[in-house]
Image: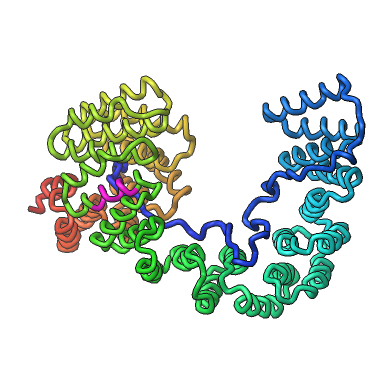
Amino acid sequence: MRMQRLKKTLPLLMVALLSACANFKHPGAAKAVDAGKPAGDEAAITQKEDETLLPKAELTPEILYGVVAGEIAAQRGSVGASAVTYLELARQTRDPRLAQRAAEFSMFAGLLKETSEALTLWMELAPDSVPAREQLFITLLRAGKLAESKPLIEALLQKEPERAPAIFVQLARLTSRQSDKQAAYELVKQFAARYPDLAEARFALLAVAAEAGDQATMNREFDRLAQIAPAWDLPVAWQVDRLRREQPEQAIDFLQRELARRPNAGLELKLAKPRLLVGAKRFAEARQAFDQLLPGNPNNPDLLYASGLMAYQMRDLPAAERHLRQALAAGHPEANFIRYTLGQIAEERQDVGAAKGWYEMVGAGPQFLPAQGRLAVMEAGDGKLDLALARLAPLGGNDQEKITLALLQSQLAREAKQPGKAHDLLSKALLRMPKAPELLYERALVSDTLGNVGNAERDLRQVLKEKPGDAQALNALGYTLTNRTSRHQEALGYIEKALKSEPDNPTILDSLGWAQYKLGRLDAALKTLQKAYALLPDPELAAHLGEVLWKLGKKDEALTVWNKALEASPDHDVLRETMRRLGAH
């Protein structure tokens, strides 16, 4: 088959899947640590130490230099070095403030060993410091040392019982890091038993039960949470996130069950259901689920955006346009993507003026070049090729963008029946990027159209130098030599090599059948081309298959193939030329 040309395609729109589970809290959990934050994001420790208990250390030049050096290093990004410096200073001076600073830098740098050492020293120097004790138990949990953290947790719960919610949320967050799952389960059960009506304790217990594989306890605790904290979404979101990775259908079923008994669940949790349905490719259900949320949240930009994209996915263009316009008016951050999509919708409605208006409004960002490309395509379609090319000429901020634009310019020139201009544009681009395989391949296609087989062969061989064994280039070279020269046996070798890489590629099978035909192997050619045409009923493949049938004396079958192809592509050049050459009409 002749070298494949670029096609004008619209990008597939997909709605994002379930967002990260974060920021879900119930009214009674105001003091709970946000379970969606990464381990290093705990709030900075600001509790002031009792200055009467601080050591009376002289501020020596060495200490001053160490503090200044540590702070400067941190500002320049060397936080780990700052942590080490402060830890050494704290050991020398026995000052808890320096130990605290060492702990903060160590946590930020992700240095578990240094963090543990700094926090242990801080606790030793300031035994009544609650922040030191809390941060140390979190660090031990992160390191998988639940048993070592037990006395710290005990002391915290006794000294500041109001911090129990935050402590249990941390236990829930970090149970997966424990190596001895059963021991962790027993320990958390002991703590949770003291707080039968505390939602965070039930969450910690079900989290550790999940790690231990105790589904019955998980079910029981979710039932309990639905009673005592029906407005707290975090445990449900946590379980949905666990299930969706490996058991997406179970995640959907679980979420539907929980939402049914949690009428006051937050919008983000409710949105998780249609997002899961999108991930499962159950688009009609997903769209219905999004739309069901709209009456209660008519001005929510995220919901309007999702509903609009799902309507577009389902080809309901009026609803898609309506919702996306509303999302834009509501201030959705993806304004340029919405404008670009509205431009596509207008194009599909054949409202060229509206489409141009939307594309012109697309500003800087990922959609800017595609929008400019669509404007250029429409200008070229109106016969304004020079204007279209001038629009594209100054664009492109990097080599890949410039390659994409050069290919589009070539495509527009070819479709305007100006292959010479296309060749010039590609040659100009290749002066800047002489080894770009995409440009070389495209110029080979144009050279073939111009009848310059030597230039086409040269460019394709250069592509193969840059991309050895590339199936598309091998096939193109084989087809060019088959179609334009008498070097049919050599051509067959390239095509067969391409076919080894992609044995079911219909375009390569077409090239193989065409080479077999040129070599006089009509029966083999017929079998190969029939297989190719069954995989891809393309008009050019129909032309080749029909010609072989015609040569075999099966003219009625050939006419049937050709006439069917003509119904779909009445102006196809290769098909028309084949029929004229063989006297079929």
Specify the quadrant of the image occupied by residue 184: bottom right
Residue 284 visible? The answer is no
Residue pushed farthest front?
52
Q: Is residue 251 magenta?
A: no
- Left or right: 163 as drawn, with respect to 277: right
Q: How is the image coloured?
A: rainbow
- Left or right: 141 as drawn, with respect to 501: right
Residue at image point 13% right, 38% down = 382
Highlighted magenta segment, given as a residue range: 338-345
Residue 70 in picture, x, y percent from top left: 77, 28
Image position of 202 with respect to 482: above or below: below
Residue 448 in picture, x, y percent from top left: 26, 33
399 or 462, which is in the foreground? 399
572 or 109, which is in the foreground? 109
Specify the quadrant of the image occupied by residue 385: top left
- Left or right: 362 as drawn, with respect to 70: left
Residue at image point 49% right, 62% down = 268
Residue 73 visible? The answer is yes
Specify the quadrant of the image occupied by residue 227: bottom right
Give the dominant element type of the magenta stretch: helix, strand or loop: helix
191 or 454, which is in the foreground? 191
- Left or right: 104 as drawn, with respect to 386: right
554 or 373, which is in the foreground? 373
Image position of 192 with respect to 517: above or below: below
Residue at image point 58% right, 74% down = 230
Residue 553 in picture, x, y percent from top left: 18, 59
Residue 124 in picture, x, y percent from top left: 91, 46
Residue at image point 82% right, 23% down = 64
How many numbered marks does the figure carry?
Answer: 0
